Image: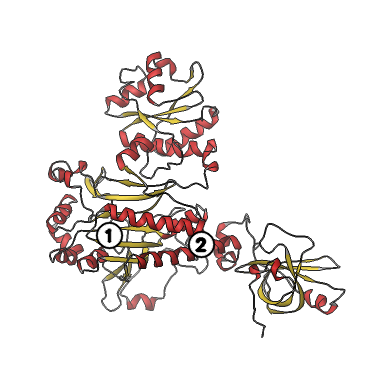
Amino acid sequence: MSFIKKNKNCGEIRLRNTNETFVLNGWVSSRRDLGGLVFIDLRDRSGIIQLVIEPENRPDLYEKAKEIRSEFVLWVGGIIRERSNPNKTIPTGLVELLVSDFGIINRSELPPFDIADGIDTNEELRLKYRYLDLRRPELQEKFIIRNKFYQIVHQYFYENNFLEVETPILMKSTPEGARDFLVPSRIHNGRFYALPQSPQLFKQILMISGFERYMQIVKCFRDEDLRSDRQPEFTQIDVEMSFIDQEDIFKLIEGLMQKTWKEILNIDIIAPFRRMTWEEAMTKYGSDKPDLRYCMEISDITSIVKNSEFKVFKDAIEENGRIEVLNAEGCGSFSRKQIDNITDLAKKYGAKGLAWIKVQEKDVNSPIAKFLTDDEIKYIIDKCAAKPGDLLLISSDKKYKALNILGAVRIECAKQSGILAKIKNQYSFHWVTDFPLFEWDEETNRFYAMHHPFTSPLEEDFKYLDTDPGKVRAKAYDLVVNGAELGGGSIRIHDNNIQQKMFDKLGLSAIEIEEKFGFFIKALKYGAPPHGGVALGLDRIVMTLSGTDNIRDVIAFPKTTSGLSLMDGSPSNVSNEQLKELAIKIIDEVNVNIT
């Protein structure tokens, strides 16, 4: 059906437009027939405005409007007037459009859920009808923020003399921990491309090629188990620079964060950001991405209780474990049930239990007090700088296991105490540096690269590469805000001999090295410059900017936690003809109900 094009957006009309005539296009958000008046809320991407039809003056329009229902698409013409019943919760709430004519451009079936903010609708239903869910203003606002961030990123890196270069989507499989998504080749039967987990090797080769400053907003893919903040395909801001050290990376990215927070949220972010080593983050907060908006620090009390008769402590120390205590400040009022719930959480992270001490004005309340001397209790309180009203939670285990447990407990205590709710609009940025280069895997009895195998070790730790690889620290760094990792990077290995040694320590044979990385090793022999970079999670940054903890809110067409796209039904079966072309045969067919 033909329609009259709009000359104004719904959400742009203000009191200053009174007595002006406009044509609007949009979707019907709601319709209310009060007999003497008909009110219609019309919505487009810019916002919503109230329309008014007066049956007494325009009975023809009143009759015509009787068939209007939610989500019908209309064009509407009329004059703007001041509302007699203003709605100050929306920008257009002081005005309304008195309808002089309208037409139904298209009708809509009854939607399976209300197209409104704050609806309590099953997420799977919303994902199945994603095109309707995306009409909701609160979701559209997140994508407006995402678009603004895109523009800021492009402008910022252009102004800083970066070249934007596209790297391949179909590439060689070089798994670095997570599984690759594989793409079979039709022309070369039996061979596969991989979708990139990261453009890592390509951006390093661009440095060897002399580009010096590269960036790209790029899609990446990882076939791994999903969480609320992960998707099988995600977007990252990929950056690489030559002839730099990590301080150059820090300064560059801090400037981007300052520009972003100012232009989108009108918040001034102070730089330089705090730097903290991985060891400090773990020993103080039990996490390599701690939330520094609140304190609640961890202390090692092993030396204080080393002669304790408390069997739990005694057994842990005898097995070279540690006794670590979290000072949950202000949580001394927690009930026994709350403490039991926190203990249950700790058990999910491998704890056998949690000991606890409530610090009171004159004494303590604790089920383990009878096993400790008065001096031991005093020294524990002093070591933790605890005050009356604090709750001390104690974990006994191997060092990093005990710390990880208390790191999870720390977050839960902040939630239950209400601290997180009070500081939700605050932002605390910091860098975590000097990660271990390797991590030991007990199951396979070998070292793995904590970041990736192209990360440079600290020069002062080179001496440990042959004798004690577990002591080697990396020139690696993560950007953290409010307990979330926004991105990470490293200074890369540019010396072929050191890269070969790195592969040796990871247990890769000469054949494996040549098969997986031969092209890159060859490139390193042709004058590779010192270089480094960072990859920022664009989706995660938009999550932070828009105040959501669900990554699916900021991706237009996301997958579920089981990797399904409920709207289009992927992954799906393919025809036998397609499989035959690819020389692929399904051995055990599994039928998945994607509904």
> At numbered mark 2, what does the secondary structure look like: helix, strand or loop?
helix
Would you say the residues marked 2 and 1 are in contact, meaning their CB atoms lie under 8 Å apart?
no
Name the outermost residue toward the front: 16
What amino acid is at disc 1?
Pro
On screen, residue 240 versus residue 520, left or right, reads right
Q: Residue 197: in sight, yes or no?
A: no
On screen, residue 162 versus residue 139, left or right, reads left
Q: Where is residue 153 in the image (x, y as percent from the top left)?
A: 41, 64
Residue 175 got which mark?
1
Report the quarter where the N terminus lies.
bottom right
- According to the picture, the residue beneath numbered tag 2 turns out to be 145
Q: Residue 422: in sight, yes or no?
A: yes
Q: Crowding at label 2, few (<14), some or many (≥20) Cα neighbours within 10 Å? A: some
Q: Which residue is drawn at 55% across and 38% down?
A: 418
Which badge, 2 or 1, is on the more N-terminal residue? 2
On screen, residue 149 versus residue 240, left or right, reads right
Q: Where is residue 237 in the image (x, y as percent from the top left)?
A: 37, 62
In this rendering, the answer to whether 11 lies above or below 60 is: above
